[in-house]
Image (cartoon, grey):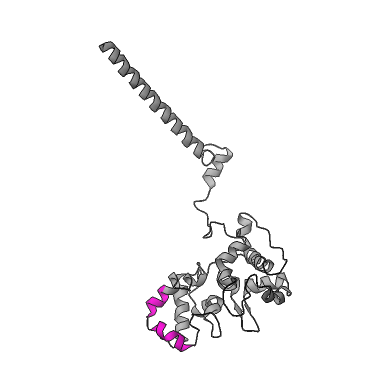
Amino acid sequence: MNTTTTSIKGSALTTFIGGLAVLLIVLFLLVKLATTGYSSEVADMTPSAVETRIQPVGRLQMGDGTPVGEREGVQVFNKVCIQCHGADVNVAFAPKITHNAEWTARIAKGFDTLVNHAVNGFNGPDGGQMPARGGDTSLTDDEVARAVAYMANQSGGNFTAPAVQKGDAAASGASAPAGQGAAANGEAVFNKLCIACHAANSAFPNSPKITHNDDWAPRLAQGRATLVQHAIQGFKTMPARGGDANLSDADVEAAVVYMANQSGGKL
């Protein structure tokens, strides 16, 4: 009887140990499979090992996960252009996507002209003001062109957008982030970005217009720190950093001070 019990216990223990060993082997193989191709022994000279040694620490990607220079027109539109060109947005002089009648005269100017205006900015004879690159200095020329083609083609046009290039070739057209290598300049930031919504003759709703002291009075009463915080973090319909994530805090503050002091403030 004792011999039988001991045999049963021994068999159960053997089974348990064997099962545990199998489980550990399976886990090891799964980990090995999951990491295959991502790294190698650094002493090896295989292509995989060399790639592991020279791979960069990090890679810059846009907020939507797409590398710089590789965004399609619809991505740029949904991130930047939609603020003024959305089908149901009410910004004076900005043609709305799918509103063909508003695009007819613009499309007639040709793709190159439209892209030039979008890349470099444009002050229309009717008072409309388009900031360079829609206010997002991180956009490459090709990304801007794809956005123009997307909007125009959704509104009666038939343009061919630049093909998406991968890697360094795509990122080579990216402009330098604002504020790097230069002192903060409120007027320059205003003329390049803020003017789209805060110009003296802008029709953008609920945004205080520069030199319109009455628009600014209740905002100035909130104090400099609050105004700067709202401009950096965003407030109601005001996008963070005016929609340009590359603006430094110093540039944003300089722009706020410039607009406020042109409108009755003494910040």
Query: Which residue shows up at 43% across the image and 27% down it?
Result: 22
Q: Nearer the viewer, residue 246 or 207?
A: 207
Query: Which residue shows up at 40% across the image and 84% down it?
Result: 218
Image x and y of residue 87, in percent: 60, 71
How many numbered marks have been drawn onto this rendered protein structure?
Answer: 0
Image x and y of residue 215, in percent: 46, 85
Position of the C terminus by quadrant: bottom left
259 in the magenta segment: no
The answer to whether 127 is drawn above or below residue 229 in the figure is below
The answer to whether 38 is drawn above or below residue 21 in the figure is below
Quadrant assignment, res 68: bottom right
The magenta region covers 210-229
Q: Nearer the viewer, residue 177 or 224?
A: 224
Position of the N terminus by quadrant: top left
220 in the magenta segment: yes
Task: Label the magenta part by its dominant secondary structure.
Answer: helix
- Asked if residue 41 can be seen in this view, the reply is no
241 left or right, relative to 3:
right
Image x and y of residue 136, in percent: 55, 69
Image x and y of residue 35, in percent: 50, 39
- Asked if residue 111 can be seen in this view, the reply is yes
